[in-house]
Image (cartoon, helix red, strand yellow):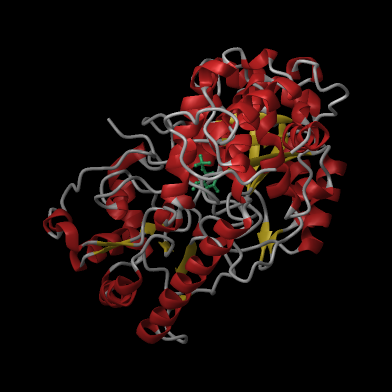
Amino acid sequence: MTAMWTDTQPAAGMPRLFERGEDLISFAGGLPDLDLLPLKELSEQLARLTRLGGRIALQYSTPHLAKALVPAITDLMAREGGSAGGAGNLVPTAGSQMGLLALGLGLATPGETVLCQTPAYPGAAAAFRTAGLRPYGAPEDAEGLDPQALRATVARLRAEGRQVRMLYCNPTFQNPTGATLSVERRHQLLDVARESGLLIVEDNPYGLLGFDGRTFQTLQGIDPENVVYLGTFSKVFAPGLRCGWIAAPEPLAGRLRRTTEVMALSPSAFTQAALAAFHARSGWDTLLDAYRERYRERCGLMADALQRELGTDGPWRWRRPDGGFYLWLRHTGRAGTRRLAVAAAEQGVSFVPGGHFGLDGECADTLRLCFSNAPRDRIAEGVSRLAVALRDAETDAKVTAETDSRAGAGAGAGSYLSPDSDADSDSDADSGPDADSGTGADSGTGADSGTGASTGTGAERRAA
Amino acid sequence: MNQPQFDQLVEEICAVRVTDSETPLVDLGVDSLHTVALVMAVEDRFGIELDPDALADLSLTSSAGLLRVVREQLPGRAPAPSGSTSAPSGE
Ligand SMILES: Cc1ncc(COP(=O)(O)O)c(C=O)c1O
């Protein structure tokens, strides 16, 4: 029995991970730093909301976005050149994870192929697979999604008889790479999407977390009639409220509303009212600035430490991101990071092996470090521990070795990302070695079978 | 704060036009959750604590009705409710 991608696996074969207990430094989970939330103010507002409006806010409601929350969303989206439209364009969600499943169920038909920017947030691939869709890597070049190659890929897939109608991407401060698609590319992508009859799904949890406050025009802002936009309060406020939204052209919003009603019956009016009240009183500036500054600092500390420990001319390559939560490392000698996660855990540090972000285990020579929730004074120590583990990569953890072990493990590979443990042959067939899967040479490498690397998320709540 | 000023506050917070101060907010297109948001903002703005029972049927509240409730709570007008803390910042 294999697990859902969200499960925290027991530390099979690596008991020392837990022996370390408190001493584990986690660079794994994508958690915001909630030290910055103004809790006193918030508790006063929540008390006021309960006292004055508890009977309304704690009642069932309908799958429409609370009008009171529209200004808060309009404000957020406008900061990146987007337009929330009116209440008719907005669908409340319990976060973008729900939004992903809702659009997989509500806007696509089972068996359909959905193109995905890769490496991809594993929750997206898992949601699409749960909806019966077949994720397929969209073509990329050094600058990210490649619009010209995309045209050819769509044509080829359709010639093979596949239905292809959607492209999923996370264009700004991407999870896991931290990369941002240039505005020029965004326009080209949207043009090709129009020509090819592709609906764009834009997942944008991190767009307002640029370290210097810089923002990038959202795809939704450029072509609101052909983009379904997933917004969330998880990273600009807090994930525990479970509140987000979908902004979509009206007919699609209607379909999504019916789907979310089946999924959840009712959104939380309480949560929406709490966020509306927070925005009405405080606006977003102060909190956003605080988050940005915090993550700029943490990212700087981590990148500086990496530079000291791993150098810039060694086998590990990375780029300093300009925003978001993550640093993405790639080994030029193709060391497999699943094993390195075990070695790292022994040193008392965790990360997420890159294979989790491949549609079918590609990216096995990469890893994701999350700096957003790492204590300031533990980052250098964590990176030192990491460096000890990574240096061992030179000798004994080649990707090929993992491929071999995968072969031994049989067909269960990829299960970490599959909703169904018996890895479905569709998805295996879809994203195997493929010239334009965009992940290039990585394809065909070992997917994590759910034993070792998932412990990269360690003893804490699962990575987002 | 006089009625026109208060109407303006309602317009600002509820994103509606107050065509008549006595019209129930619901008839102006303000839903119940938005009324809650309004009452929260009003408490905040005036530094008062309103009696939820005086607002029993929020959906029937009008801008003028709400201002009357607010005035009753302002110190110097009527006994302050037991929970009232901070000084009024309105008017
Ligand atoms: C790219 C991306 N999409 C969606 C989500 C889901 O976020 P939530 O459901 O909390 O809104 C995350 C969370 O980390 C993410 O990184």
Q: Position of residue A93 (x, y in %)?
A: 58, 30
User: Which residue is located at x 36 percent, y 31 percent?
Assistant: A421
Number of dots carrying numbers? 0
Q: Position of residue A262 (x, y in %)?
A: 56, 15
Locate the N terminus of chain A by quadrant. Answer: top left
User: Which residue is located at x 36 percent, y 57 percent?
Assistant: A28
- Depth check, front residue: A58 or A41: A41
- Depth check, front residue: A363 or A9: A9
User: Which residue is located at x 36 percent, y 38 percent?
Assistant: A411
User: Which residue is located at x 50 percent, y 31 percent?
Assistant: B80
Q: Which residue ends up furthest to the front in the rendered image?
A: B76
Asked if A304 appears above or below B42 in the picture, the reply is below
Is residue B27 among the parts visible in the rendering? yes
Residue A308: name its quadrant.
Answer: bottom left
Is residue A128 among the parts visible in the rendering? no
Position of A231 with respect to A452 (left or right) is right
Asked if A446 appears above or below A64 in the picture, the reply is below
Position of A316 with respect to A461 (left or right) is right
- Depth check, front residue: A351 or A464: A464
Position of A380 with respect to A204 (left or right) is left
Q: Position of residue A91 (x, y in %)?
A: 67, 28
Q: Position of residue B85 (x, y in %)?
A: 46, 41
Position of B74 with respect to A353 (left or right) is right
- Depth check, front residue: A337 or A413: A337
Asked if B25 appears above or below A280 in the picture, the reply is above
